[in-house]
Image (spheres, grey):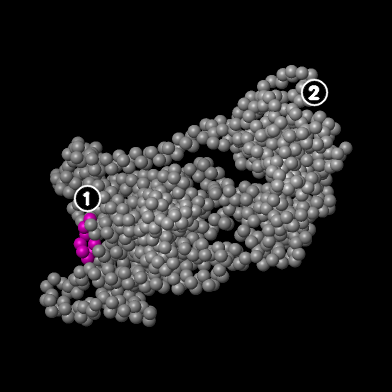
């Protein structure tokens, strides 16, 4: 078994909003090996983005982060910002959701890529620029030399996202976070970008952590899937075990998410089984299972006691008192 | 942006066009349009000034000749000076002269052109001194403040800029005089002339420039700091920069400050108009031989050509200031310079 | 919110799952929020309170307490220092009581600047709202007028009027209102333009409400916060400009007291007795600071841009 690239244990992130404590991430643990593709799925507010930003050190000061996160053996939690900066952008990098807003509109794209290089390596400007052009080619942008001198607003959405990827890959990170990287793009471009990411993953032997609300994305591209709800992991399994033939989703929430995806095979004019209600207010989490208020199968013990995440089947963890039967719904 | 006091109060001829800019109109066309828009403003201002002076009881000739002049002599002088013509005739004549580059003759008998030629450079130097120093200081202080919002430097800068915004330039001038000229003796109390050496130039103009510059510094600092803090907290490209591992200072300067310059340029341009009054008073207090001083003398003498000439110059400065701000904005903002997507 | 300790009721339950570990103890307090709220309240009420005090001092105090004359002084009592008996802030070179000069000068400062600003609001808001609401050539023309007023050196106007017609309070008010008009006009116009595309405006129009009704009942109430905050700042600016005019001798005619003329008079003995300049300057400064702070606090409170 290869040594873990990223080993996260009991990560907790809390901050104060309006005088009240928000526990955005409440005890998350997972492991990523080199070359893996992990998908973290959840609704907004589930804590998926916050946990990854906590690992990167991109949360505002005053946020309380505890737990352990070891990147190739080096502990990340508790480091000062200047210490964490050495890893940020070089060993681990992030691609963000909205490339239109994530690129500085007044700096040429080539320079923005070169900045990522020069931050971590002492090279001349010319050398950095050359490498930046190479990176533009790596992300399959045509006419790379010309594009180098252009400004973000002169590029299309898909190309901007490629530039973001180029920036993230500038120092050949071993771990790449893709935070809803394709959400803001149209479907065709989405597929192109995902394909690009996977190719680059292979080429650079990189682990990829995809953050998304899209189960379909996870099913298509991920090796391992984590489902988060209200700051906790509620289900975790290899993608094949969850979505593949003979696979089964056990936690009710994940089941509900899957059921809510419209299928062509569904009988016409039937109501889509959406999940009613909204994610809980993070400052007032219910006792017991956080999903209980919205779960059709919730019973009294669901409302009283929080189910712990435990490995009930080999490689498959879930946190539910009354999980789905193996092999199907209900 | 949290506080845009003066920028709001001085909407200026450029504000409206800012919205149109987003549509990506070519810079040159915009400049041309702005120039065209400026002309009626210049017209209006000078016309209004002329009208005001004409509406007021005119005893210029009387003042020139003295109290014992006979009505006939006054009438004759009035006729010579053309003061008995209806005001639009006089304005027309003046305008004609202006278009030929001749600003007329002041009541003292000198050509307004030559008056301006001697005194305008002084005022411009004073303005430049005040502007440059207050801009530089504002950038430094705002950057330090934005680096740690609500930190010590930030709070201090907010206090100081509140004082700067609220202080009357003339009152502040006296404070400066008391401290620096009287008690410390570093600068002269009056700056009769600028002297010939750089040292004497500095000595003469520093206190006046500080009096004018302090409110400017206050406005610039406030706006710049607010803009930078907002960017650091809200803009996604700042997160990207941090994700690259860029050090916080570099993020502030290279990304946030750079973008804030646009706002700053706009504010500087818009604020030029407010300087007229301040310049006039400060020049009087310190006896600086500039056109502000002349303006006040001219008004008390009812010297219409002189006053008109100076008003025209000030209006030109205001309008050109706005124009320059727009131009710089167009030149520096790549979204305007390079138009929309080429892919 | 604490999770109950694990109580395995049945063997089966305990093999399936145990209760989650106890939650993180609260490490972030609401102390900071409380101090933020306190700060915000202080920033509003301290300047407001100060202004109320100043207004009370200038307008109510003379009614209650007989102050020495602000215009005539006893030359025998000239140049008395502050805290002298009968003269709380001393007297100036000709024996006029400084404190009463401040009080009556303050009356005049407030009267003139508030009146000028109110006129400026009335005219400026009208122009601005009409320009913003109707758009088109109406807007073009009115905006041009606002531009001209903005570029026009109001100081020149005020001085000219004062010089030609003779200095008087009324002339001063008219001249200074010219100054305020473009400021308010711009804000009003800007806000109206933003409002014009708001859904509730379209709804009102569709309901058949006539133009003027819409303006009065919908537009005006929405722009009031912006106008009020701008006006507070405007009053501060007008006070300073009015002081400048007094300082130059073109404002309130002497011997009526005004802060500006006090500064001008104090100029002559600046080196020997700087307090003649410093005292009115201090009152001027603190009053304008209070106005600015109040404007900022209200802007914060009402969420105006």
As drawn, B187 above or below B13:
above
Chain for disc number 1? C
In reply to whether residue C163 is colored magenta, the answer given is yes
Chain for disc number 2? C
- Dominant SS of magenta comes to helix
What residue range appears in magenta?
Answer: C162-169
Spot occupied by residue A136 in the image (x, y as percentages of width and height): 75, 60
Disc assigned to residue C257: 1
Upstream in sequence: badge 1 or badge 2: 2
As drawn, B61 above or below C166:
below
Which residue is most to the right?
A1
Marks 1/2: CA distance? 91 Å
Q: Is residue B287 visible?
A: no
A297 to the left or right of C89: right
Spot occupied by residue B251 in the image (x, y as percentages of width and height): 62, 51
Residue holding disc 2 = C15
In reply to whether residue A42 is colored magenta, the answer given is no
C259 to the left or right of A218: left
Q: Quadrant of residue A24?
A: top right
B242 to the left or right of C13: left
Residue lying at 67% horizontally and 26% vertically, measured from the top left: A303
Question: How many callouts does the rendering have?
Answer: 2
Disc assigned to residue B327: none
Work out which quarter of the rendered image holds the N terminus of chain C and state it. Answer: top right
Residue lying at 27% horizontally and 59% vertically, measured from the top left: C174
Q: Quadrant of residue C152?
A: bottom left
Q: Is residue B71 visible?
A: yes
Residue lying at 76% horizontally and 43% vertically, measured from the top left: A39
Spot occupied by residue A81 in the image (x, y as percentages of width and height): 66, 41
Q: Secondary structure at mark 1?
A: loop
């Amino acid at each position: 078994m290869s040594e873990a690239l990223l080993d996260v244990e009991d990560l907790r992130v809390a901050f104060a909003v309006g005088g009240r404590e928000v526990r955005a991430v409440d005890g998350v643990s997972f492991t990523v090996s080199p070359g893996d593709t992990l998908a973290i799925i959840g609704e907004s507010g589930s804590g998926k983005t916050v946990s990854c930003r906590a690992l990167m050190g991109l949360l505002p000061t005053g946020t309380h982060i505890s737990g352990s996160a070891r990147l190739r053996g080096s502990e990340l939690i508790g480091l000062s910002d200047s210490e964490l900066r050495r890893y940020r952008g070089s060993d681990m990098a992030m691609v963000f959701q909205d490339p239109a807003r994530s690129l500085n509109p007044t700096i040429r794209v080539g320079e923005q890529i070169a900045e990522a290089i020069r931050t971590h390596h002492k090279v001349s400007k010319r050398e950095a620029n050359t490498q930046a052009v190479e990176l533009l080619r790596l992300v399959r942008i045509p006419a790379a030399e010309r594009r180098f001198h252009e400004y973000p607003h002169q590029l299309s959405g898909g190309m901007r996202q490629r530039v973001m990827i180029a920036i993230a890959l500038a120092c050949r990170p071993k771990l790449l976070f893709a935070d809803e990287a394709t959400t803001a793009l149209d479907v065709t471009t989405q597929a192109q970008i995902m394909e690009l990411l996977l190719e680059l993953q292979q080429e650079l032997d990189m682990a990829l952590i995809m953050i998304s609300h899209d189960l379909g994305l996870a099913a298509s591209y991920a090796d391992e899937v984590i489902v988060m709800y209200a700051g906790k992991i509620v289900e975790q399994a290899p993608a094949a075990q969850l979505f593949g033939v003979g696979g089964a989703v056990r936690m009710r929430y994940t089941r509900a998410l899957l059921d809510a995806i419209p299928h062509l095979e569904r009988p016409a004019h039937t109501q889509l089984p959406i999940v009613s209600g909204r994610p809980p207010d993070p400052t007032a989490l219910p006792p017991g299972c956080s999903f209980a208020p919205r779960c059709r199968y919730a019973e009294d013990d669901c409302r009283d006691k929080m189910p712990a995440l435990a490995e009930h089947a080999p490689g498959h963890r879930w946190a539910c008192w009354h999980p789905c039967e193996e092999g199907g719904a209900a | 942006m949290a506080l845009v006091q003066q920028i709001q109060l001085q909407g200026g001829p450029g504000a409206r066009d800012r919205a149109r800019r987003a549509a990506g109109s070519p810079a040159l066309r915009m400049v041309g349009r702005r120039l065209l828009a400026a002309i009626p403003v210049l017209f209006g201002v000078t016309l209004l000034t002329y009208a005001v002076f004409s509406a007021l009881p005119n005893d210029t000739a009387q003042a020139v000749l003295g109290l014992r002049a006979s009505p006939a002599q006054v009438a004759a002088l009035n006729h010579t000076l053309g003061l008995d013509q209806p005001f639009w005739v006089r304005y027309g004549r003046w305008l004609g002269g202006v278009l030929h580059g001749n600003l007329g003759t002041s009541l003292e008998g000198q050509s307004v052109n030559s008056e301006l030629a001697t005194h305008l450079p002084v005022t411009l130097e004073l303005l430049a001194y005040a502007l440059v120093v207050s801009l530089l200081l504002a950038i430094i202080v705002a950057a330090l403040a934005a680096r740690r919002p609500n930190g010590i430097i930030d709070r201090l800068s907010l206090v100081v800029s509140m004082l700067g915004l609220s202080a009357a330039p003339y009152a502040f001038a006296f404070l400066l005089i008391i401290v620096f000229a009287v008690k410390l003796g570093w600068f002269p109390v009056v700056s009769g002339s600028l002297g010939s050496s750089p040292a004497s130039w500095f000595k003469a103009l520093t206190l006046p420039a500080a009096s004018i510059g302090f409110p400017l510094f206050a406005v610039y600092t406030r706006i710049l700091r607010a803009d930078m803090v907002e960017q650091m907290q809200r803009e996604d490209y700042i997160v990207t920069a941090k994700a690259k591992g860029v050090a916080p200072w570099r993020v502030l300067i290279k990304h946030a400050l750079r973008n804030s310059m646009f706002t700053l340029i706009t504010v500087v341009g818009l604020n030029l108009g407010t300087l007229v009054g301040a310049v006039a008073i400060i020049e009087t207090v310190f006896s600086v031989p500039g056109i502000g001083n002349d303006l006040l003398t001219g008004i008390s003498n009812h010297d219409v050509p002189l006053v008109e000439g100076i008003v025209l110059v000030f209006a030109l400065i205001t309008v050109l200031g706005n124009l320059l701000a727009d131009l710089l904005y167009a030149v520096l903002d790549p979204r305007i310079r390079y138009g929309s997507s080429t892919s | 919110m604490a999770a109950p300790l694990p109580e395995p009721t049945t063997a089966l339950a305990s093999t399936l799952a145990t209760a989650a570990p106890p939650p993180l103890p609260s490490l972030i307090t609401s102390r900071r929020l409380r101090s933020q709220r306190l700060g915000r309240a202080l920033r509003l009420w301290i300047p407001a309170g100060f202004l109320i005090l100043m207004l009370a001092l200038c307008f109510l105090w003379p009614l209650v307490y007989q102050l020495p004359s602000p215009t005539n002084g006893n030359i025998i009592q000239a140049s008395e220092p502050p805290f002298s008996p009968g003269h709380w802030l001393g007297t100036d070179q000709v024996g006029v009581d400084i404190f009463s000069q401040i009080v009556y000068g303050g009356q005049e400062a407030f009267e003139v600047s508030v009146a000028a600003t109110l006129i400026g609001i009335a005219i400026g808001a009208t122009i601005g709202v009409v320009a913003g609401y109707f758009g088109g050539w109406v807007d073009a023309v009115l905006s041009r007028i606002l531009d001209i007023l903005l570029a026009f050196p109001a100081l020149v106007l005020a001085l000219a009027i004062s010089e030609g017609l003779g200095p008087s309070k009324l002339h001063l008010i008219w001249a200074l209102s010219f100054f305020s008009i473009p400021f308010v006009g711009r804000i009003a116009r800007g806000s109206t333009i933003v409002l014009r595309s708001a859904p509730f405006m379209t709804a009102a129009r569709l309901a058949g409400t006539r133009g003027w009704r819409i303006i009065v009942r919908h537009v005006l109430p929405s722009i009031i916060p912006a106008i009020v905050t701008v006006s507070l700042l405007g009053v501060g600016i007008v006070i300073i400009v009015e002081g400048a005019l007094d300082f130059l001798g073109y404002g309130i005619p002497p011997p009526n007291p005004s802060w500006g003329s006090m500064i001008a008079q104090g100029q002559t003995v600046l080196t020997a007795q700087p307090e003649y300049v410093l005292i009115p300057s201090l009152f001027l400064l603190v009053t304008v600071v209070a106005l600015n702070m109040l404007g900022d606090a209200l802007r914060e409170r009402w969420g105006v841009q």
